[in-house]
Image (cartoon, rainbow, N blue to C red):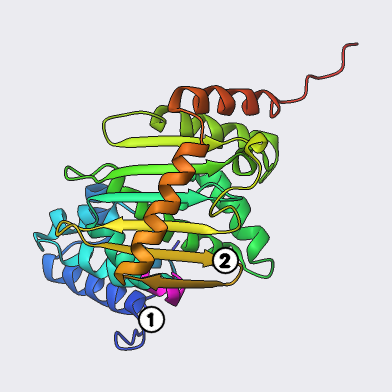
Amino acid sequence: MTAGARDLEPARSAKELYGAELRRQRQLSGMSLDRLSAVVNYSKTHLHGVETAERLPLPPISQKLDVAFGTGALFQGLWGAVKREYSPRRFDHCLELEAKAVRIQEFGASIIPGLLQAEPYMRALFRACNPGAGPEKINSLIAARMSRQEVLHADNRPDVWWILNEAAVRQAVGGPAVMREQLAALLPLVETDHTTIQVVPFDVGACPLMNGTLILLTLPDNSTTVYQEGAGSGEVFDDRETVMRQLRDYDRMKACALSPKGSAALIKAAMENFKPCEPPQT
């Protein structure tokens, strides 16, 4: 059973604005929560939580609400605002550009990049990085990150090229089962019409960019913006000198990396190290 409605203050947060608008549109349409649940195929409990700003609107609920109420892209736009509330402020501009980019190039030194992360891997990372956070906070962070991955399935999806340090595929984030699932999720994206994954093996030794994260975002006007991140800090650059230097460093990383075919082989080899333990023979 869900609790009664509570007063919201839409000016206080995007999440409360989303909940207030959901309640308003539902009441205008004359729908009960039960009826809306059947229309959008989300539980009544989840819809009530979104209405009361106690839960995040997990994708793809926003698209379904816009269809149900005939509101164009209203809820999809509100979700964009909610999503930004749950992202580090330094990353806001990067997120905005990522959604518009025609080409994304990214290097991950020690963890799998966000656009490639499977949900259990995300959960393990967020728990490790937010040890005091409760389930609702962790679920909110996961929902925000998973929503970023929608760009990979859009009709106008960008060309995306990832280079991963071997450490990212060897570090046992979340344990063997989580890592095996994560590595399996990489394999279909290693070489497609829109995606490429390369791995830089340990035996390459020192190479550019190895001590941080780099994202290069190219927009339809062919301009490129750089996002660099280290431990606890991130910066955005769009000046020509920095962009050209980082593009060159990224190209040098490609030269250090294995081919997509070789990268797939390394990922499969890493998966073998994360096999579930066999029960002892009796």
Span of residues in magenta = 83-90
Foreground of the two, 64 or 138? 138
Image quarter hosting the N terminus: bottom left
Q: Mark 2 sits on what residue?
A: 230
Instruction: State the image coordinates of residue 69 (x, y, percent, origin top left).
Output: 13, 60
At x 68%, y 70%, the residue is: 132
Examine the image and state in which quarter residue 56 appears.
Answer: bottom left
Residue 113 location in percent, x, y? 49, 50
Query: Could you say whether the residue bearing mark 1 is in a helix, strand or loop?
Result: loop
- SS class, disc 2: strand
Label 1 amino acid?
Answer: Arg
Q: Disc count in the image?
A: 2
Dominant secondary structure, magenta: helix
Horizontal relation, residue 21 to residue 123: left or right: left
Q: Residues within 10 Å of mark 2 (few under 14, many from 20)?
A: few
Residue at 54% x, 55% y: name it.
209
Please, what is the three-letter code of the amino acid marked with disc 2? Gly
Residue 47: horizontal and vertical position, in percent?
A: 34, 61
Name the residue at 23% across, 45% down.
Answer: 157
The label shown at residue 6 is 1
Indicate whether residue 87 is drawn in magenta. yes
In the image, residue 67 sits, relative to residue 78, either above or below, namely above
Would residue 207 be seen by someone viewing this image from the given angle? yes
